[in-house]
Image (tube, rainbow, N blue to C red):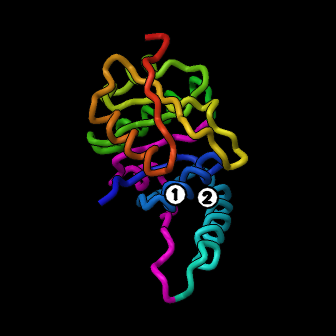
Amino acid sequence: MPPTVAIIGAGPLGRWLALTAARAGFPVLLEDVMPGNLHHAQEILRRQLSPAALGLDSGSLAAPAIAFVSTIEDAVREADLAIDCVPDELESKLEILWLLDRMAPPRTVLATPTTRLSITDLANCTYRPEKCIAIAAEAFELTGTLAPEILLRTTPRTSPETIALVQHFWLQLGFTPTFKPDPTA
C-alpha cells in the first residue's frame, strides 16, 4: 500500500501537490483552515480527477481520490507524509510544524516548502527532528510545472528512513530528488 499523504493548505501549491500525488496513486488528504478555500479546491480537483478528465470511460478503473478534510487532526491521523503549504514565514511554519508534530503519529514525516528558513532550526522545534525535511520552494512554479529535479534539504539528524520515504514520493511523481544538507546546519 502506498504511503498516505496529508497536504495542509488548499491553495495553488497544495492543490497541485494533491492532484499530482493522487494521480501517482497515493492516498491524499487535503486540508485547509478556510472552508471556502477547501470548497474551491474540491470543485477544481474533482473536475480534474473525473473519469472524463483522465480519459477513462465509465467502465474503467476509478479515478484517483482525494479526501477533503476540515481539520489538521483528520488530515494527519493516518499520514505517513505530511506536507504543509502555508506561507513561508517563520511564525506560520513554526505554528504548523508545532500542530503537525503533536497531532500526527510518530511515524509521520514532516515536509515543508521553504526558500529562506532553516530546516534545521524548524526541525529542532519538534519532537521528531529526524523526520523533518525541507522542499526547496524555489523549484515550484505555480504554473503546474516543476523542474525535473527537486532539491530537498536535510538536517544533520534527518534519518535514512525519512530520506527513503521522501525520495520514493518524488520519484513516483516523476521527479528526481536531490538531497543536500541545510546550509545553516
Q: Residue at coordinates 46% horizontally, 35% vertically from top-left?
A: 177
Q: Residue at coordinates 37% horizontally, 54% vertically from top-left?
A: 4
Q: Position of residue 42 (x, y in %)?
A: 61, 65
Relative placement, left or right, of 121 versus 105 is right
Say which residue label 1 marks: 70
Question: Farthest residue in the top direction?
Answer: 184
In the rendered image, residue 70 lying in the magenta stretch gets the answer: yes
**How many neighbours does mark 1 have within 10 angstroms: few (below 14), some (14-19), or many (20 or more)?**
some
CA distance separating discs 2 and 1 = 8 Å
Q: Is residue 2 above or below residue 171?
A: below
Task: Mark 2 and mark 1 in contact? Answer it, CB < 8 Å.
Answer: yes
Q: Quadrant of the N terminus?
A: bottom left
Q: Which residue type carries mark 1?
A: Ser
Q: Residue at coordinates 62% horizontally, 33% vertically from top-left?
A: 139
Q: Is residue 136 above or below residue 120?
A: below
The one nearer the camera, 4 or 121, is 4
The one nearer the camera, 154 or 56, is 56
Which is more foreground, mark 2 or mark 1? 2
Say which residue label 2 marks: 38
Q: Is residue 57 above or below residue 115?
A: below
In the rendered image, residue 29 lying in the magenta stretch gets the answer: no
Magenta-colored span = 59-86
Q: Is residue 149 above or below residue 17?
A: above
Dot label at residue 46: none
